[in-house]
Amino acid sequence: MKQLETAIFAGGCFWCMVKPFDTYPGIHKVISGYTGGHVPNPTYEQVCQQNTGHTEAVLIEFDPTIVSYEKLVEIYWNQTDPTDAMGQFQDRGESYRPVIFVKDEKQRQIAEKSRTALANSGRFDKPIVTQIEDAQPFYPAEEYHQDFYKKDPKRFALEEAGGREAFIQKHWQ
């Protein structure tokens, strides 16, 4: 059996963070959920109240023989505004902040090197503020949040149209 690894990224609404990873070769599973907070097993309603400390995130199970962690970090950057510390696009507040949650020193070094390269690239006029933090317990979101882009494509399109899609086209393509 293949030895899968995990990566955890927060980049605003978790609905929008699933599809870019889900469709990439070597990705076994992408799970929407919550991490980084102090309330065990939080619900969507609790996280939305912005008092659990949790951030909406995705946990990615991947085959490192097909896709590297470095590539996942690159895909992550291309889905976010790394200059916005307290939300992403129309989603505002602590639960939508951009964070790369690392599980070990190897992931930390890769993420920090990538963040430094992005900061030095001149791509953005503002500082890169995406945090790199130790991974915390990850709690899967309720089932109706999983694979949302497949379940409700019309509503998903509205979420993407809230500034994310235009930002990506302007800054990343």
Image (spheres, rainbow, N blue to C red):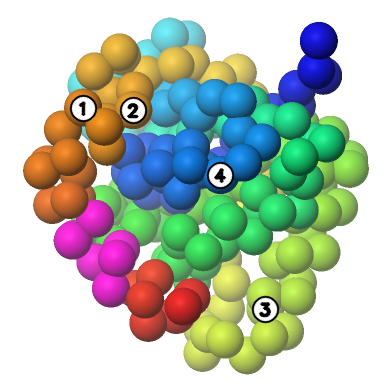
**x and y, in percent, of residue 97 in the image:** 44, 50
Query: Which of pointers 1 and 3 indicates the residue nearer the eye?
Result: 1
The CA distance from mark 4 to mark 1 is 19 Å
Q: Which residue is mark 2?
A: 147
Left or right of 162: which side holds 44? right
The dot on residue 24 is: 4
Q: Amino acid at mark 2?
A: Asp
Do the residues under discs 2 and 4 have CB atoms within 8 angstroms?
no
Q: Amino acid at mark 3?
A: Ala
Residue 104 appears at what percent x and percent y?
84, 34
| Mark 2 Cα shell of 10 Å, populated few (<14), some (14-19), many (≥20) | some
The answer to whether mark 1 and mark 2 are in CB contact below 8 A is: yes
Total of numbered circles in the picture?
4
- Marks 3, 4: nearer the viewer: 4
Q: What residue span does the magenta drawing correspond to?
A: 160-166
Residue 7 lies in the magenta stretch: no
In x, y percent, where is residue 117?
A: 75, 75
x and y percentages locating residue 55 in the rendered image:
44, 36
| Placement of 122 over or under 129, stated as above or below | below
At x 83%, y 36%, the residue is 65
> Within 10 Å of the Cα at label 3, are there few (<14), some (14-19), or many (20+) other Cα atoms?
some
Q: What residue did someone put label 3 on?
A: 119
Q: Amino acid at mark 4?
A: Tyr
Q: Nearer the viewer, residue 31 or 34?
A: 31
SS label for mark 2 = loop
- The residues bearing labels 1 and 3 have C-alpha atoms spaced at a distance of 36 Å
Amino acid residing under circle 1: Lys
Whether the magenta-drawn stretch holds residue 164 is answered as yes
